[in-house]
């Protein structure tokens, strides 16, 4: 298994703390609150979606809005009680993603495309056809930017569609069978779906052997979640129904029959988010970290972020799986 390190530049702090991001967070939390107050919402219960450990053995991660658990077996963070996929998708279609925010995402999009190209070289294969599953729902500018920056690859984009419970992932299964892509992209999706294993199985059962699956998702082992917990600005419950740990997601992928070719945590934001938190919060007094961040300059933040990436402790992770 290969574990690359990404030496990206640190982002400008203003790009992670804008008023528009705060409006998105409030809108999503209001939608969750409405769901919880609605008597017609049906909820189902689950154990750890990564390793299967019973939820009674987990510890409480957050009780705010929706309860969340942290698995003591694999460190994955998850909501033990969920609405249906159909309900979740309907709410997502109602959420308007602000297009102005998209201007800051060229760097992220380029990084994702580079990831595909590097993997293509490392794995010595040709990924000429790639199917993107739903990332355009989180990043409306992604399809146009990706097509503009990609010359030799045929990318197709499957949008977010609401389907009945009985037809879960029918759109994905049909697209995979019709297009037979060399690679499938599942970016920022694994943490939002009601049943991550079902999504992975739907891919596994409908592609040719040797197809690559690129997964980008949030990471429960990240320093941001370790220190800030549910106070982390990235923790929007409806968008983080499952925050896998590295070992938890690896175990799930292997249990479903995937080869894990590559794992990395190329997150760029832990250091700047924690820096902002400690410089703005007077009462926080965490041994070592409080003084570390209060005295930190940009060089120190960059060094810390590189260390986190190297040690698989940043809050975003990427997997390359092979069917
Ligand atoms: Zn677990």
Image (tube, rainbow, N blue to C red):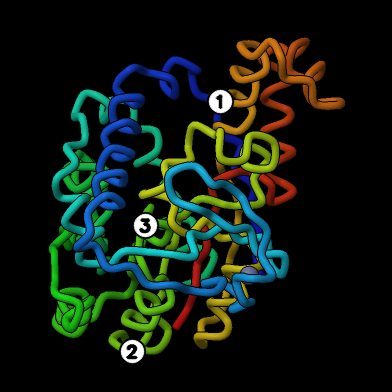
Residue depth check, mark 3 versus mark 1: number of the one nearer the observer: 3
In the rendered image, which residue does mark 1 sit on?
10
Q: CA distance from mark 3 to mark 1?
A: 26 Å
Instruction: State the SS at label 3.
Output: loop
Report the quarter where the C terminus lies. bottom left
Of labels 1 and 2, earlier in sequence is 1
Of labels 3 and 1, earlier in sequence is 1
Q: CA distance from mark 3 to mark 2?
A: 21 Å
User: Which of the numbered marks, if any, corresponds to residue 205?
Assistant: 2
Most extreme residue toward the right is 287
Residue depth check, mark 3 versus mark 2: number of the one nearer the observer: 3
Quadrant of the rendered image containing residue 292: top right
Q: Where is 16 relative to 217, above or below?
A: above
User: Which of the numbered marks, if any, corresponds to residue 145?
Assistant: none
Q: Where is 198 relative to 142, above or below?
A: below
State left or right for residue 166 relative to residue 321: left
């Amino acid at each position: 298994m290969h574990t690359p390190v990404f030496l990206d530049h640190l982002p400008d702090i203003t790009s992670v703390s804008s008023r528009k991001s705060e409006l998105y967070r409030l809108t999503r939390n209001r939608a969750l609150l409405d769901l919880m107050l609605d008597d017609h919402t049906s909820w189902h219960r689950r154990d750890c979606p990564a390793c299967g450990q019973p939820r009674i053995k987990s510890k409480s991660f957050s009780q705010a809005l929706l309860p969340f658990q942290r698995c003591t077996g694999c460190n994955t963070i998850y909501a033990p009680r969920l609405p249906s996929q159909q309900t979740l998708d309907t709410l997502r279609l109602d959420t308007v993603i602000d297009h102005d925010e998209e201007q800051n995402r060229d760097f992220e999009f380029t990084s994702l495309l580079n990831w595909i190209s590097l993997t293509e070289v490392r794995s010595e294969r040709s990924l000429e056809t790639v199917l993107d599953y739903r990332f355009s729902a989180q990043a409306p500018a992604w399809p146009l930017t990706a097509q503009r920056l990609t010359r030799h690859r045929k990318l197709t984009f499957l949008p977010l569609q609401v389907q009945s419970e009985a037809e879960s992932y029918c759109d994905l299964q049909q697209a995979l069978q019709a297009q037979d892509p060399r690679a499938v992209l599942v970016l920022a999706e694994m943490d939002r779906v009601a049943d991550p294993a079902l999504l992975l199985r739907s891919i596994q059962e409908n592609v040719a052997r040797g197809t690559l699956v690129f997964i980008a998702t949030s990471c429960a082992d990240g320093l941001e979640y370790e220190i800030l917990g549910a106070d982390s600005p990235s923790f929007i419950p409806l968008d983080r129904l499952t925050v896998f740990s590295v070992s938890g997601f690896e175990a799930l992928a292997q249990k479903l029959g995937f080869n894990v070719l590559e794992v990395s945590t190329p997150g760029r934001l832990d250091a700047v988010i924690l820096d902002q938190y400690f410089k703005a919060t007077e009462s926080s007094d965490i041994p070592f970290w409080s003084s570390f961040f209060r005295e930190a300059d940009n060089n120190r933040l960059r060094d810390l972020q590189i260390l986190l990436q190297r040690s698989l402790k940043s809050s975003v992770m990427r997997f390359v799986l092979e069917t």
